Image (cartoon, helix red, strand yellow):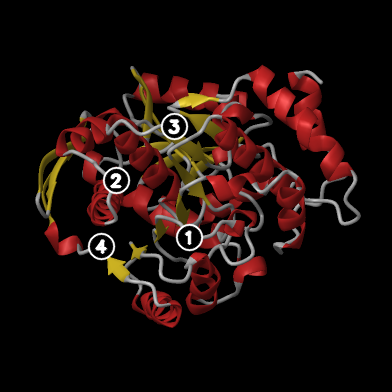
Amino acid sequence: MNYSEALEYIHSVNWTFCKPGLERISALCKALGDPQKDLKFIHVAGTNGKGSFCSMTESVLRAAGYKTGLYTSPYIKVFNERMQVGGEMISDDELASLTEYVKPIADAMTDKPTEFELITAIAFEYFKRHKCDVVVLEAGMGGRLDSTNIIRDPLLSVITGIALDHTAFLGDTVEKIAAEKAGIIKDKSPILWGGDDASARAVIENTAKEKGSEFFFVDYSKLQNINATLDGTTLDFSEHKNIKINLLGLYQPKNAAVVLSAVDILRKEGMDIPESAVKEGLLSARWQARFEILSRDPLVIFDGAHNPQGIDSAVMSIKHYFRDKKVYVMTGVLKDKDYGVISTRLAEIASRAFVMTPENPRALSAEEYSKILESKGVSSEAYGTIKEAFAAAKQAAKQDGVPLVCLGSLYTYSSL
């Protein structure tokens, strides 16, 4: 099996898109010898901020000398991004070899695993073979029935925050979604809460109490001396002074505070993480498509915000960096997102919109979304392709001297 054949198999239309439950992943991993049982994990769930937290945490642990694994989703440009060891993506050859190894076992199952379950099992085997000291493991959706939740006894579980998203699968209230995310809490394993919703916190804290797990929360009052510019951000948090991160976005200092809180807990759990490694790891952390500057002339920023909470954060960042100056946006959304709320928020910061249809079967058409934005007072134009929208937007931004922000869907990043 070569790389192309491996991806074709993984993405096969025969795989069910979403079928929650731990029965299939349990059976698949058992047939593989339960590779996850030989690994130590930091398990991460939450509506927003998971990716940035995972990237920064992995970078800090790697700087501290640990052999790290990193499992994230979705990928931005290439599939291999989803599983990394020591900051390096899995190679094409190794992904092909591992998929070939797992394929006959998965095919022999009566109840076939989903695509995400298959990928998770491949990742566990990958991390085991590389003898990772610690794996930063991002849950795919929810927590309780997510395939990553087959692990036991994590070093630390983290829930970055809760907001309404994936309501068809996780529930239509913050409390219901919090209960699903709280499913990653294990007996007598520490849990860190990074959100600010009181109702969600109550659910998570009660679950921790039932599990006999020590509950920690991020005290954002200790986040001070923030200086955020388009060249990076400096901050102090508790005993961590003069921290610098290159990840942009006004939400990143809070994400960094979650990482620093996690570091403090992991130190209590016996991990050796020098402060020099904390600073080095946070400074060198990179995370694509999160308020990322793609060019300076014209100034083009990409942010993968795609739900109301994410858009709120992006809008706050735009207002901070550009003050009263409105920007141009290139945007598109999926039908299952709350695009009414999203378009209202975009109208606060955008004077002109270049609208495209994301390359996804769940996408809202550019024409329909353009009309919605027009109704909110934003001059909007619909384009046939992402490349056409981006070319027109970039040309207009350069000609008019206006910053361009691309947001609304992660699926557009690889097409720019």
**How far across and down, in percent of the image, does residue 111 sit?**
87, 57
Q: On the rendered image, what quadrant is the C terminus found in?
A: top right
**How far across and down, in percent of the image, does residue 110 sit?**
91, 55
Q: Is residue 166 left or right of residue 318?
A: right
Tell me the number on the disc at residue 153. 1
Q: Amino acid at mark 2?
A: Gln
Q: Nearer the viewer, mark 4 or mark 2?
A: 4
**Residue drawn at x 40%, y 65% as measured from the top left:** 189
Mark toward the start of the polypeptide (1 vs 3)? 1
Mark 4 and mark 1: Cα distance apart in space: 22 Å
Mark toward the start of the polypeptide (4 vs 2)? 4
Q: Give SS at disc 1.
A: loop
Mark 3 and mark 2: Cα distance apart in space: 13 Å
The front one of 6 and 251 is 6
Q: Amino acid at mark 1?
A: Asp
The front one of 393 and 338 is 338
Mark toward the start of the polypeptide (3 vs 2)? 2
Q: Amino acid at mark 3?
A: Gln
**Residue drawn at x 55%, y 39% as measured from the top left:** 410
Q: Give SS at disc 4.
A: loop
Disc 4 packing (10 Å; few <14; some 14–19; many ≥20)? many
Q: Give SS at disc 3.
A: loop
Q: Nearer the viewer, mark 2 or mark 1?
A: 1
Q: Quadrant of residue 119?
A: top right
Q: Are marks 3 and 4 in contact (CB under 8 Å)?
A: no
Location of residue 12 with respect to 176 vertically, above or below: above
Q: Are marks 2 and 1 in contact (CB under 8 Å)?
A: no
Tell me the number on the disc at residue 218. 4
Report which residue position mark 3 lands on.
Answer: 288
Mark toward the start of the polypeptide (4 vs 1)? 1
Report which residue position mark 2 lands on.
Answer: 252
